[in-house]
Image: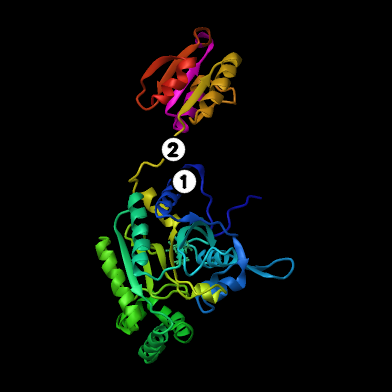
Amino acid sequence: MKYSAPRGTKDILPEESQLWQFVEVACRETFELYNYKEIRTPVFESTELFSRSIGESTDIVKKEMYTFPDRKGRSLTLRPEETAPVVRAGIENNLISPDQLTKLYYLGPMFRYERPQAGRQRQFHQAGVEVFGSSDPQLDAEVIQMSVKLFEKLGLKELEVNINSVGDKKCQPVYREAIQRYFKENIKHMCEDCRQRFDQNPLRILDCKEAHCQPYIEKAPAAVDHLCPECKSHFEQLIGWLDKLMIRYRVNDRLVRGLDYYTRTAFEVISKQLGAQNAVCGGGRYDDLVEELGGKSTPAIGFAIGLERVVEIIKNHPITHYSLPITLFIATLGDKAKETGFKLLADIRANGFSADMDYQGRSLKAQMKTADRIKAKYVFIIGDEELAKQSAMLKNMQTAGQQEIAFDKLLEELKGG
Ligand code: HAM
């Protein structure tokens, strides 16, 4: 009996994990540059946390959650996203307060029971940020800018920032009504999903990808035309700040996010280097969520990046050098040489250089093959003759050049590059 990874999940193998680490380090460095601190929350939470925050009528809550009872019958759910857990943890640990700015970031696996396809998995990974304590549109611009800077650092090209405003508690019902009024006549010609959404979550109709629904969707009223004066001004200020930061964006009045907690700013970063699942980042403001989950009313904004999609782009467009090669491989011939090599290895590693040797008693030729496979930059070859001289050839695998180095000078040589 052979087992395979569950449908919609993937093993990240050593060859690819270097690229993952490169992406993760870039995320951490960028977030920390903007003064975010890491938070780690459990992989599962009470089901109600997600159904209340993401919304009962969303696809995520209706169809995509991994929900199970524990042995005491409590309903738990593997996190489909991280905003709700961060808000929960922030309130529970008194990290969030309306009169201070709290900036948090996270990296980790999320779980959604979706139909797997390129760029869509059931276990996938996000890197995201959440900032609490300000409704200043300048902060919205900073958050969007940070995602763009991160993608630039990773070498991603052909990106498009889409922004929209979905209004607040005051203007959302007005827009919802306008949408329902508009679709009322034609909803019978639209797909099953749209018909279902019409009553429960009419805004989501705008997100339908069915070709025959598009003519109706194209002419639907825009949220930005139904904003109250405060939300309108907030959106205009955001645009002003993005212009000042020289961030290019497209105002996309069809942009509706798949989670119900958003207010005002909603945004997505789309990559033209991907297929159908082309959103590499999604986020927005959620000024009511902290209060809805039992905290003091505190405005907030954040985003999450889909790491599988970022990794996919870099893999297909090798733009940046990301591999972290093993620095040195010590090839040995005979037990005495192995003993000396073993000691040298410990010393080299203790000085921060990555190094390895053979433990399978293989021939010199086989050892050289291993050095090549693990992409060692240097090989140091020790046999009886070398033991007698206390020096050996250090071979540069990239240039094929070599020079004799005394055992006690090896470290110095590596330090010199
Ligand atoms: P989201 O748009 O549902 O937002 O997910 C953010 C990103 O995660 C997507 O743009 C996509 O890159 C990636 N993603 C989502 N589902 C999958 C999947 N099944 N397979 C692979 N990648 C996926 C959120 O999750 C919000 N919590 C973002 C946020 C943070 N809003 C405010 N703060």
Please indicate, yes or no, whether residue 54 appears anywhere in the rendered image. no
The percent coordinates of residue 20 (x first, y second) are 46, 48
Q: What element carries label 2?
A: loop
The percent coordinates of residue 27 (x first, y second) are 43, 52
Camera-side residue of 68 and 108: 108
Camera-side residue of 165 and 305: 165
Asked if residue 240 lies left or right of residue 98, the reply is: left
Q: What residue type is labelled 1?
A: Gln
Asked if residue 363 lies left or right of residue 285, the reply is: right
Q: Residues within 10 Å of mark 1 (few under 14, many from 20)?
A: some
Q: Name the residue under label 2.
A: 324
Is 15 drawn above or below residue 200 in the view shown?
above
The percent coordinates of residue 95 (x first, y second) are 54, 63
Q: What residue type is labelled 2?
A: Leu
| Residue positioned 48% across, 45% down in the render | 17
Camera-side residue of 400 and 47: 47
Q: Name the residue under label 1.
A: 21
